Amino acid sequence: MFNWFRHKAMDRELTEILDRHQQVRRDATDIRAYLLRVLADNRNDSEKFSDEALEKAAELIEQVGPGAFYWMTDIAAQMVLLSEATLRGFATNVSVELGATATAEEIVQKVVRLP
């Protein structure tokens, strides 16, 4: 009987871990999609800070919390470091893997890795 309870508890704990991982992955996917949207908006000369863009940002913050802001800031910092390295003539893993013709979208896909 004790083994049955132990197995049920372990099954429940494993299910909770897997569910949490799936939620984190969905959140990360939503953040990456938002970054790509902002990039597309910049390319298309769309209005910056539009009501729609700000509403989506607010939804992300509500969904993910401060982690979304921190993660997006961390991504921006990585992009700046990549740019700095490139300007100084250093090769990065991104430049080596994607090459000189990489698009901004490809760089975001490479830098923003999903869990």
Image (spheres, rainbow, N blue to C red):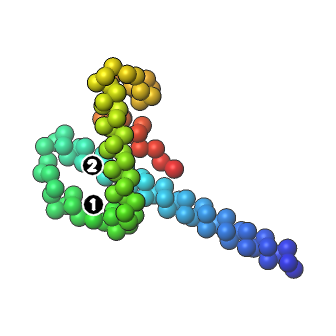
Q: Nearer the viewer, residue 90 or 38?
A: 90
Residue 55 vertical placement versus 5 (above, below): above
Task: Find residue 113 and name its label.
Answer: none
Query: Which quadrant of the structure image shows residue 67?
Result: bottom left
Q: Residue at x 37, y 40 (%)?
A: 78
Q: Nearer the viewer, residue 97 or 37?
A: 97
Q: Position of residue 22 (x, y in %)?
A: 53, 59
Mark 1 or mark 2: which comes first in sequence? Answer: 2
Q: Position of residue 85 (x, y in %)?
A: 34, 27
Q: Which residue is mark 1?
A: 57
Residue 113 visible, this angle: yes
Q: Is residue 56 left or right of residue 113?
A: left
Q: Residue at x 42, y 52 (%)?
A: 29
Q: Which residue is mark 2?
A: 37
Q: Quadrant of the N terminus?
A: bottom right
Residue 103 visible, this angle: no
Q: Residue at x 14, y 51 (%)?
A: 48
Q: Position of residue 108 (x, y in %)?
A: 36, 40
Q: Is residue 115 left or right of residue 60?
A: right
Q: Is residue 6 left or right of residue 32?
A: right
Disc 1 residue type (three-letter): Ala
Q: Is residue 42 left or right of residue 66?
A: left
Q: Circle 1 sits in a helix, a strand or a loop, which is it? A: helix
Q: How many marks?
A: 2
Q: Circle 2 sits in a helix, a strand or a loop, which is it? A: helix
Residue 34 vertical placement versus 5 (above, below): above
